[in-house]
Amino acid sequence: MSAPTIDQVRPHMSALADELTRSRAIRTPPWAEAFRTVPRHLFVPRWFAQETNERGIAVWREHQGTETADDLAAVYRDQTLVTALDPDTAEQVDDTAWTGIPTSSSTLPSLMAGMLEDLSVEDGHRVLEIGTGTGYNAALLSARLGEQMVYSVDIDPGLVRAAQDHLSSAGFMPQVVPGNGAQQGYPTGETFDRIIATCSVPAIPAAWIEQSRPGTVLVADIALGIEGGLVRLEVDEQGCARGRFTETAGRFMAARSAARTYPVPQRPERAAETGTWPSALTAADVRGNYAFRLLLALRLPGAELVYHVDDSGAMALQIQDPAGSWARLPLGGDDVGAVTYGGDPGLWTRAEDMWRWWNDAGRPSHDQFSYVRKADGSTHIWHIPDGTRLDVSA
């Protein structure tokens, strides 16, 4: 298939905008118009879809954005498209497939739309985007506000160059530069009316506050460990950012400290198995309740949620902490209500305590929790209905 003309692509753009409007991801006409006029395929000329190959290996299969009519249609579906793999983990297994860890993507359009709506931009606002990626989000912002009001930073100089090319081909020239935006914000230290991050961070960096004005709105994905979520915050005159977790739910790849790779996590040796006891909290409870996982991340700072496969092939959900303790719940079989643990038994009792609190509180959804980042960097989460405060470890 030759490169499509804008007239050939316009029905795809309109269909995507209509779909996002029906789902209420888009809630205002200016953002509907932006999605209707910015061609996504220019920003994802190459992308990867995960599949299992004939050898049973999970691989990332390369696609060219306009190589076939099906590929072009796929670009305009409401789906995330992986656009880059970590070169330290990527291994080519055939002509068009690799294993590896994704490091960049074109975000799910409904998630992008929800975040852009939550940003509450107005004409004349200057916006900073952390995580340029493909440049598609910067193009949507440029279509809405004008390219002169849009600034974007990405840690990968190669992605910046590619994004600049994509943006130019779409007719936009916002200010896009390389830099560690997750730690330093925009390199020149300017101030902004709105800041949006398309990568996750463990906490709101001081640089973002310093580059805000009173009234600046921040929309970002906060990674708390086991789980995380999108927050919408407003910065006041004292440099305190307060708001809440948004109705828009979604997660982003973590901000990287290196341009193209993630550091290999250093995990301790796991404790020997200590015992098993019955539990009211099951793996299905953890997997099926996003708001509870968010609270569990606060109760168990630094812990991870992983899958464990034993020698028989049985799979379990495992919580493990930085000190080596762990607690494991089977995903199936006759013992789904039994927890096996190693090391500190308090790891699981704290999880059960949070499960009881969440149920006693009526199972509040994630958007019933506020998020406050004080000027000194300390962070708290509040259950809005009753004022219960949960501290966030730095």
Image (cartoon, rainbow, N blue to C red):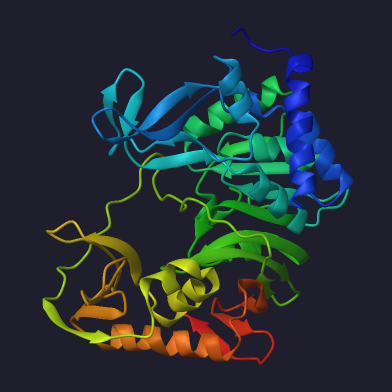
Give the residue displayed 30% in from the left and 34% down from the top: 90
Q: How many marks?
A: 0
Give the residue displayed 39% in from the left and 45% down from the top: 258
Q: Name the residue nearer the viewer: 159 or 120.
A: 120
Q: Residue 190 at x, y = what percent? A: 69, 52
Give the residue displayed 56% in from the left and 22% down from the top: 71
Can the viewer see residue 205 in this picture? no
Quarter of the rendering occupied by the N terminus: top right
Give the residue displayed 50% in from the left and 78% down from the top: 295
Residue 381, image quadrant: bottom right
> Can you say whether 217 is above or below 277 in the image?
above
Residue 312, image quadrant: bottom left
Q: Name the residue nearer the viewer: 270 or 216.
A: 270
> Can you say whether 367 is above or below 154 in the image?
below
Residue 147, image quadrant: top right
Q: Residue 141 at x, y = what percent? A: 75, 41
> Does residue 377 appear left or right of residue 320 in this picture?
right
Can the viewer see residue 314 in this picture? yes
Q: Residue 9 at x, y = what percent? A: 73, 20
> Does residue 237 appear left or right of residue 265 in this picture?
right
Q: Residue 153 at x, y = what percent? A: 58, 43
Q: Name the residue nearer the viewer: 328 or 248.
A: 328
In the displayed orientation, state which residue is furthest to the top. Answer: 2
> Does residue 306 appear left or right of residue 177 in this picture?
left
> Can you say whether 157 is above or below 228 in the image?
above
